[in-house]
Image: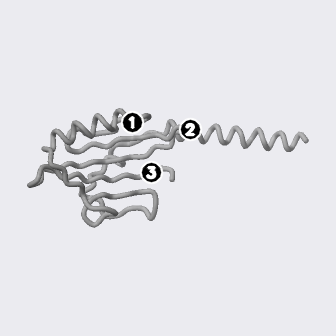
């Protein structure tokens, strides 16, 4: 009985340690602030690219880039558990953490001027799966 209790206690401590590590692990902008236009290699899972040659085509919007950037920034920062990691305006990366364990997901957005208004490219990926 004591061995089982020790195993359960060890597993509980290990899970608590993992949860703390996931929440407190630093997010280095030099690693995660990635321009969607330059993404050439992605992991086999846990990422999605909206850009030429990606999982979906870029978004074409009729508004100018500064208006699109301001609207997108407001939407992102109003999303629960989302903060800005790096950048602003036409190139920004956000972190959104899951509710229970705080797993970080990174979303990098590039907004370019286009003939019809703006073109938006997005690279989203998870860090821990």
Residue 6 point in image, percent of width and height = 81, 40
In this view of the protein, which residue sits in the foreground, 113 or 39? Answer: 113
Give the vertical position of 68 relative to 36 (above or below): above
Q: Which residue position is annotated with label 2?
A: 100
* Front label number (1 vs 3): 1
Q: Residue at x 44, y 35 (%)?
A: 81
Residue at disc 2, secondary structure: loop
Residue at disc 3, secondary structure: strand
Mark identifier at residue 126: 3
Q: Which residue position is annotated with label 1?
A: 79
For the view shown, which residue lies furthest in the bottom direction? Answer: 53
* Colour mapping used in the image: one colour
Q: Residue at x 20, y 42 (%)?
A: 68
The quadrant of the picture occupied by the N terminus is top right
Dot 3 or dot 2, earlier in sequence:
2
Q: CA distance from mark 3 to mark 2?
A: 15 Å
């Amino acid at each position: 009985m004591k061995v089982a209790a020790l195993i359960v206690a060890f597993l509980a401590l290990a899970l608590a340690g993992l949860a703390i590590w996931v929440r407190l692990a630093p997010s280095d902008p030099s690693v995660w602030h990635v321009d969607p236009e330059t993404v050439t290699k992605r992991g086999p899972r846990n990422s999605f690219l909206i850009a030429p040659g990606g999982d979906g085509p870029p978004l074409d919007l009729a508004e100018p880039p500064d208006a699109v950037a301001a609207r997108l920034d407001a939407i992102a920062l109003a999303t629960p558990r989302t903060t800005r990691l790096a950048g602003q305006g036409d190139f920004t990366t956000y972190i959104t953490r899951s509710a229970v364990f705080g797993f970080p997901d990174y979303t990098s957005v590039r907004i370019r001027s286009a003939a019809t208004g703006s073109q938006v490219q997005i690279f989203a990926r998870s860090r821990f799966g």
